[in-house]
Amino acid sequence: MITLLVVLSSSHSFAQSTISQSPFDLTASSGIWVADLPEYKLGTNAGGGSAFADDLDEFGGIVRIDAVRRALGTRTSFGANLFYAYADSSSNTQPGDIGIENPADGANVALTGISPRLDSSVHHYGGDLVIRDTWRTRFGGLSAGLAYSLMAFDQDFDVMNGPGRLFKEELDTDFQGVKIVSGWEGFVRGNASKLDFNVGVYDMQTDYDALPGSVPAVFSDELQQTTYTIETTFTTRRRVRDIDVGLIFGVTYFADMPVIEHLAGESVSLSTDDAVTFTCMLELSLY
């Protein structure tokens, strides 16, 4: 990816865009990332509710770098991007007696007088390689193309009794596939703007691991299936003190995101549910 960014910036060409006359654009973005992921539940408490639970509406941050190289004498452009996002949360339930299922075999583990706490985190990262054509029209630039896409969600769930760990569950999910990319670019209220709409088809590979603490939970599982995503992003830019500054809003829908299923008398199994992520970033032009 780094080699490609160097090659993209190495020479000059005529711009193929309705909003930029630069043969090469390099931008960096940073901002807010919100992930609405499938809910996590484990065990029961004395009141009949979940001993450990988190709705996994995670609030965090994201950084991203984008490069676009417009090919000489054609309408074609080549792009690349890299991103990293992170969020975490901690949830506590009422102290008391609980029962939880051991991930290895589903056997009930009865615990008395404990202080249940669930610490969860998610790392989301990846990148795309994109080739697209742009057609100039009276309504602005219309574009379409293809992208190779690779991304991951690494989730950790620390099941705690106060400061001590009962056990830990890890859910690492890789998405590899292609995107059909399309978009419009033009001017909105005098500001250069873009609207992108992408549909991705992915091979999803999930690896699950339970790691022991005071509860001897050791287990592994995996899940593989084909899934899809729908992504839309709106970017608007303006000149501020001779610097190009942009504001980016994005939403991505995931048709399938893995869910940990804890069942009494059975080892952990994996299913899926849908998920959504939201981004709001400030973008700066580097080149």
Image: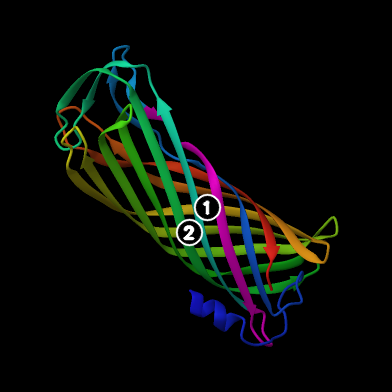
- The residue under the point 40% across, 59% down is 202
221 inside magenta stretch: no
SS for dot 2: strand
Percent across and percent down for residue 231 are 55, 53
Magenta span: predominant SS is: strand
Where is residue 19 shown, x and y percent of the image? Answer: 77, 69
Query: Badge 1 local density, few (<14 within 10 Å), some, or many (20+)?
Result: some
Number of marks in the image? 2
* Residue closest to the far front: 163
Residue 114 in sight here: yes
- Name the residue tied to disc 2: 200
User: Which of marks 2 and 1 precedes in the sequence?
Assistant: 2
Horizontal and vertical percent for residue 236?
A: 74, 57
- Mark number for residue 151? none
Residue 203 position (above or below residue 131): above
Question: Which residues, given as a range, are shown in magenta?
Answer: 53-76
Instruction: Kindly check if marks 1 and 2 are in contact, taking CB atoms under 8 A apart as contact.
Output: yes
**Residue at 76%, 76% in the rendered image:** 21
Residue most toward the right? 190
Q: Is residue 93 left or right of residue 58?
A: left
Residue at x 71%, y 78% (from the top left corner): 16
> What amino acid type is highlighted by mark number 1?
Ile
* The magenta stretch spans residue 64: yes
Placement of 171 over or under 73, stated as above or below? above
Q: Is residue 96 left or right of residue 201?
A: left
Mark 1 highlights which residue? Answer: 230
| Local secondary structure at mark 1 | strand
52 or 262: nearer the viewer: 52
Q: Nearer the viewer, residue 86 or 35?
A: 86
